[in-house]
Image: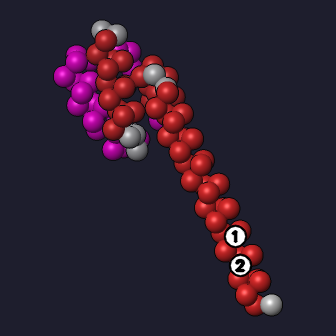
Amino acid sequence: MENKKNRIVYIVLIILFAYFLENCTTAKDTIAKKTGTQLWSENCIRCHNIPTPVDFSDPQWQTIVLHMQVRANLTAIEAEKIVDFMKNSN
């Protein structure tokens, strides 16, 4: 009887692990599909008014986004897309 309970617990754990693994992959895929414009508008407004791309120069944007990558917990890909958007919108 104990072995049957253990097997059931293992099966449930495997199913839960697979579920969470799939959701993590889906979240990464969703972020990867977003444009720099989307990431900029979704992330920057969380804490402050959104600056426009013309507010700062390209080198300044590079520094600002590097700083905000740490503060806003952005991935490297998100930060790169945001920097590209800001530089190309000047």
Asked if the residue under mark 2 is in contact with the one under mark 1, i.e. CB atoms within 8 Å, the reply is: yes
Q: Residues within 10 Å of mark 2 (few under 14, many from 20)?
A: few
- What is the quadrant of residue 36 in the picture? top left
Residue 61 seen in this snapshot: yes
Looking at the rendered structure, the kind of residue marked 1 is Ile
- Residue at 71%, 68% (x, y): give it: 12
Magenta segment boundaries in residue numbering = 47-72
Query: Residue 78 location in percent, x, y?
Result: 39, 33
Query: Residue 1 location in percent, x, y?
Result: 80, 90
Q: Residues within 10 Å of mark 1 (few under 14, many from 20)?
A: few
Q: How is the image coloured?
A: secondary structure
Mark 1 lies on a secondary structure that is helix
Pick the front one: 8 or 31:
8
User: Which residue, given by chain and number where applicable, does mark 1 sit on?
Assistant: 11
- What is the quadrant of residue 11 in the picture? bottom right
Question: Is residue 87 depicted above or below 43 in this figure?
Answer: above
- Residue at 66%, 62% (x, y): give it: 16
User: Which residue, given by chain and number where applicable, does mark 2 sit on?
Assistant: 7
Quadrant for the C terminus, please.
top left
Pick the front one: 17 or 83:
17
Question: Is residue 16 depicted above or below 87 in this figure?
Answer: below
Looking at the rendered structure, the kind of residue marked 2 is Arg
